[in-house]
């Protein structure tokens, strides 16, 4: 069974930082990329960033490039999302997800396992 558990969300002021974690359990994790998505109230879920376990290669949405950093700790089966210079419009539930295939994607339907999400609230 595959399980993803996010943590690290909370309330932060605009311009502040948070680090999210996603602990993964289950078999054959090392070949499937992991991604972070977010969903604000009344909006569709959107891609934030993805990372490959094998070589740490990452991809980012244009809106977060230069402010967010995706990383992983293979020994702990955990991915991290460091978020700096947060903006109020980035208030959302943040989810981690595992890719169905060996390449990462910006589309949520290409991910088959999801965490429960962690709330990030950025106050102005």
Image (cartoon, rainbow, N blue to C red):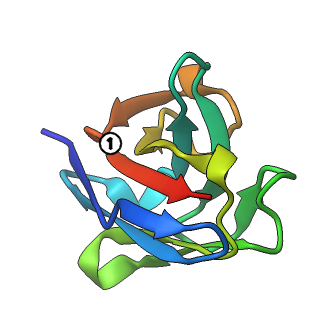
Asked if residue 110 lies left or right of residue 94, the reply is: right
Query: Most extreme residue toward the front, as rendered?
Result: 124
Above or below, 111 relative to 95: above
Image spot of residue 34 (x, y percent):
49, 52
Q: Nearer the viewer, residue 61 or 30?
A: 61
Image spot of residue 60 (x, y percent):
76, 56
Above or below, 11 relative to 28: below
Point 63% across, 67% down: residue: 14
Above or below, 13 relative to 93: below
Asked if residue 88 lies left or right of residue 2, the reply is: right
Helix, strand or loop at label 1? It is loop
Question: What residue sits right under mark 1 in the picture?
Answer: 117
Residue 55 visible? The answer is: no
Point 34% across, 61% down: residue: 10
Asked if residue 49 lies left or right of residue 118, the reply is: right
Q: Give neighbour class at mark 1: few <14, some 14-19, many 20+ (Cα, 10 Å).
A: many
Image spot of residue 112 (x, y percent):
40, 28
Q: Quadrant of the N terminus?
A: top left
Point 70% across, 74% down: residue: 85
Asked if residue 42 lies left or right of residue 46, the reply is: left
Above or below, 52 relative to 110: below
Point 33% across, 70% down: residue: 78
Q: Quadrant of residue 43?
A: top right
Image spot of residue 46 (x, y percent):
64, 32
Residue 25 visible? The answer is: yes
Q: Nearer the viewer, residue 6 or 100?
A: 6
């Amino acid at each position: 069974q595959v399980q993803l558990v996010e943590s690290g969300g909370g309330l932060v002021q605009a311009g502040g930082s948070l680090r999210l974690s996603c602990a993964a359990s289950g078999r054959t994790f090392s070949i499937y990329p992991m991604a972070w998505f977010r969903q604000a109230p009344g909006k569709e879920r959107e891609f934030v960033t993805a990372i490959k376990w094998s070589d740490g290669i990452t991809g980012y949405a244009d809106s977060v490039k230069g402010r967010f950093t995706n990383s992983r700790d293979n020994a702990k089966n955990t991915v991290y999302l460091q978020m700096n210079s947060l903006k109020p419009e980035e208030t959302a539930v943040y989810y981690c997800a595992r890719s169905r295939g060996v390449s990462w994607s910006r589309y949520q339907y290409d991910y088959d396992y999801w965490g429960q999400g962690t709330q990030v609230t950025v106050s102005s």
